Image (tube, rainbow, N blue to C red):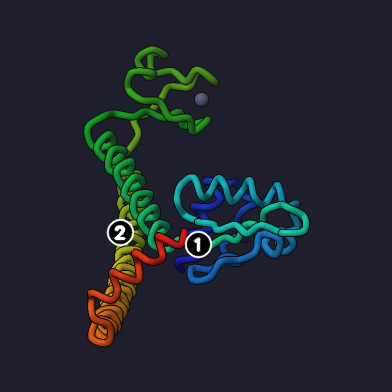
């Protein structure tokens, strides 16, 4: 389900060509761009252009390695899952706002329709054309907004479900991040402790005075 949403977003950012790139990217490890290009059946430049567009939104990140013989760089790409989810959430909220706006407009304004051509007119345009269709001359009839509002509400329900799903995924990803951060910190603490232990052992073995002398003698030699 997440991949389906991500594909929609990638297509909106980088075009239809980029749709399957989601299947080739990973959220954990970096993937060689030559592998991505080969699987997409695109040149390395086309592939990079797509990935740059996506990285402009922070949805992918890269590391690069220099080929010592040829002197060029190879890029390795990774999907930024958390950023993708945040992007998705913002996108869904934006869509919902637009629909709410449409619903409000349907609830407060009159719309007219030509029964022959099915063309819709807002009140202003209907007045301009004197309530006669500008295509066929047929007299317009007032549009029943209730079914339109019902459709919009269905869309809202669908988006609300999507939002719930994205929120769940966001929670999981954020928890993962917190845990890995905590692991990093405890690792650092452990290293610090070991370092402290070693230095205290060293000072026990060597008295401070001798240490100073040896430093001075080194400087004189230079
Ligand atoms: Zn008409």
Residue 197 in the image: x percent, y percent?
25, 84
Residue 2 in the image: x percent, y percent?
45, 66
> Circle 1 is placed at which residue position?
79
Nearer to the camera, 209 or 58: 209
Q: Is residue 140 left or right of residue 3?
A: left
- What kind of element bears circle 2? helix
Residue 47 seen by the camera: yes
Residue 186 seen by the camera: no
Residue at x-position 57% and y-position 47%: 52
- The mark tally for this picture is 2
Labels 2, 1: front one:
1
Q: Residues within 10 Å of mark 2 (few under 14, many from 20)?
A: some
**Up-down: is 19 above or below 108?**
below
> Circle 2 is placed at which residue position?
160
Q: Which mark is residue 182?
A: none
Residue 106 placement: quadrant: top left
Nearer to the camera, 169 or 155: 169
Residue 53 in the image: x percent, y percent?
55, 45
- What kind of element bears circle 1? strand
Nearer to the camera, 76 or 132: 76
């Amino acid at each position: 389900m997440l991949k389906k949403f991500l594909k929609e977003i990638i297509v909106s950012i980088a075009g239809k060509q980029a749709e399957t790139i989601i299947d080739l990217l990973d959220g954990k490890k970096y993937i060689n761009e030559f592998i991505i290009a080969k699987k997409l059946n695109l040149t390395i430049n086309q592939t990079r252009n797509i990935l740059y567009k996506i990285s402009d939104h922070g949805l992918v990140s890269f590391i690069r390695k220099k080929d010592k013989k040829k002197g060029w760089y190879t890029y390795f790409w990774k999907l930024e899952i958390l950023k993708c989810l945040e992007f998705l959430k913002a996108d869904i909220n934006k869509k919902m706002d637009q629909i709410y706006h449409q619903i409000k407009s349907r609830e407060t304004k009159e719309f007219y329709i030509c029964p022959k051509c099915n063309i819709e007119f807002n009140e202003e345009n209907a007045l301009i054309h004197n309530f006669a269709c500008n295509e066929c001359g047929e007299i317009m009839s007032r549009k029943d907004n209730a079914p339109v509002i019902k459709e919009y509400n269905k869309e809202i329900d669908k988006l609300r479900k999507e939002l719930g799903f994205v929120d769940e995924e966001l929670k999981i990803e954020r928890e993962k991040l917190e845990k890995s951060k905590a692991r990093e910190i405890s690792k650092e603490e452990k290293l610090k402790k070991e370092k402290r232990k070693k230095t205290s052992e060293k000072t026990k073995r060597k008295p401070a005075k001798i240490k100073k002398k040896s430093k001075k003698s080194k400087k004189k030699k230079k």
